[in-house]
Image (cartoon, rainbow, N blue to C red):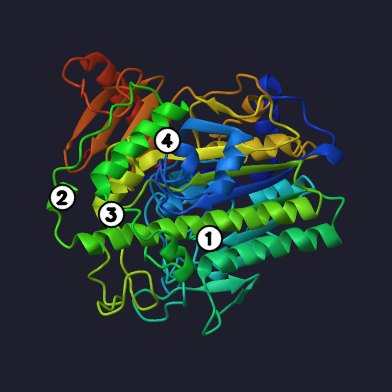
Amino acid sequence: MQASVSGWTSASRAGVAALLIVAAACQSPPPRAQSTRPNIIVIMADDLGYSDIGAYGGEIDTPNLDELAARGIRFNRFYNTARCWTARASLLTGMYPHQVGLGGGILASDQPLGEPGPNQGHLDENAPTIAEMLSDAGYATYMAGKWHVGEQPQHWPRRRGFDRYFGLISGASSYFEIIRDQPRIRQMALDDDPWDPPADGFYMTEAITDYAVRFIEDHASARPDEPFFLYVAYTAPHWPLHALPEDIAKYDGRYARGWDAIRAERHARMIESGLIDERYRLSPRPPQVPPFAAAENSDDWVRRMQVYAAMVDRLDQGIGRIRNALQASDAYENTLILFLSDNGGSAENVSGRDLHDPEVPIGERGSYAAYRAPWANVSNTPFRRYKSWMYEGGIATPLIAHWPAGIADPGRTSSRIGHVIDIFATSVDLAGGASSAPGGSPSAPPVEGRSFAGVLAGQIGETHEALYWEHLGHRAMRRDDWKIVFAPANDRWELYDLSNDPTELDDLAAARTEILETMIAAWEAWARRVGAWSGGN
């Protein structure tokens, strides 16, 4: 079917701004004066599970994120889109990925551009990005990290509203070097130019942090009277499992108890902390995952999770450096920091790829491995399934909001149901809604995201009537506490009552057929509207 991206026009940015202004006026605080508008930093982890960080039950040392949560807000019912590039497309535009050309895969840098549509393979040129909107509102805009929404130079960040950029244009890559071999050529860039890492001393997570800190420091020096937006898109802890030796050593022995014990401990901590309650039953270990006591090569499995934890640890250290840079530039108090993940933990197995040298210990340069389903199941505690699936394990994300000058009643947990599309709406709302923009374009698509600025201020805030998902045949919809899920492997729709069964263990499809059929019809109408599905299975 035809893409809804055809609805975007050159006037869409003004139309989006006007729609957001109207929506924000209903429930959010009035726009702030320019001098008090917050800086906004969005930090996205890559393939991080719901329970990996300490504030969400994990045993990995994440003191910086934990402090942000303790002095901010933990959201316990926030969603991503279950996949790397789709989540990034939604974060950048506030739209579902199909509406902006990324409902399917990503075009490689040497592939010809196809017809515009929901699966065109790069971010639609006319879909306003968060950087473009905030630039129009008077913000300086910076990005450090993984782009992954367009490989060709005409689709790079500086063409989409960012004043400065450093990072990985492509998807997954080695943390110690850039991959140049077919078919997995990877590209890094500094601003508009290709960039190659040094032969030695390079580690991707540290490099992303270095430039994020540099952008903060340079802004404080050159543009101190202007607010800024910074998007920090770490590649960690996405495979390959690569970490620095001192970080790996820190976790010696921590995972020797195995996945069953670690998962149960996480579940208990999540309940004890008030993040979840007893309704969140621990989903059973997947059939293909053996009890840890029966696992072969247990030392290898322990090493995989040890390296994964080290990668998350180093990411958290980077966030600490970003906080220090904010404090040194007197920007900390009036900076909103948002932290989330692009999808759930990944069960993908990459050990058989030709990039992996089995003689090299996992974690070191020359290895190329993943932690796979047993540990991904731990990362997604207490939920089922993983990245790319539409069960909660694939789409539930931690979201931490921290803003000393703007968050009411810090230290609380919010159960406001939200989605990565809301970050665009919230940022534009807090930036003043680009209120100098001219009247809206009647051809601009409706804004999909809803601002949660009101939640930060201690109000109820805007809510969604329903949320929808589709990716490579996996489908879902949530309306209130009812959720439907379609997994291609099962070839049927399932129905769950999340008010009583938030970990999706009791399928009510046969018992509540009226609810199921009504929601399927609503999902199909949404799918046709955004270009996600044209009928049939």
Q: Which of pointers 1 and 4 lies earlier in the amino acid sequence? A: 1
Horizontal side of 245 relative to 191 (left or right) equals left
Q: Nearer the viewer, mark 3 or mark 4?
A: 3
The amino acid on which the numbered mark 3 sits, given as a three-letter code, is: Ala
- Toward which corner of the image does residue 481 lie, by quadrant? top left
Q: Nearer the viewer, mark 1 or mark 3?
A: 3
Q: Which of pointers 1 and 2 lies earlier in the amino acid sequence? A: 1
Q: Position of residue 318 (x, y in %)?
A: 59, 58
- Looking at the figure, which quarter contains the N terminus? top left
Q: Which type of secondary structure does the marked residue at label 4 adopt?
A: helix
Query: What is the distance, in whole Å, between disc 1 and disc 4 at their CAs?
Result: 27 Å
In the rendered structure, find residue 529 and report the number of the disc placed on it: 4
Residue 127 is at least partly visible in this image: no
The amino acid on which the numbered mark 2 sits, given as a three-letter code, is: Ala
In the rendered structure, find residue 293 and report the number of the disc placed on it: 2
Q: Which type of secondary structure does the marked residue at label 1 adopt?
A: loop
Q: Which of pointers 3 and 4 lies earlier in the amino acid sequence? A: 3
Q: Residue at x 69, y 45 (%)?
A: 40
Query: What is the distance, in whole Å, between disc 1 and disc 3 at their CAs?
Result: 36 Å
Q: Which of pointers 4 and 2 lies earlier in the amino acid sequence? A: 2
Which residue is tagged 3? 256
Which residue is tagged 1? 147
- Number of labels in the image equals 4
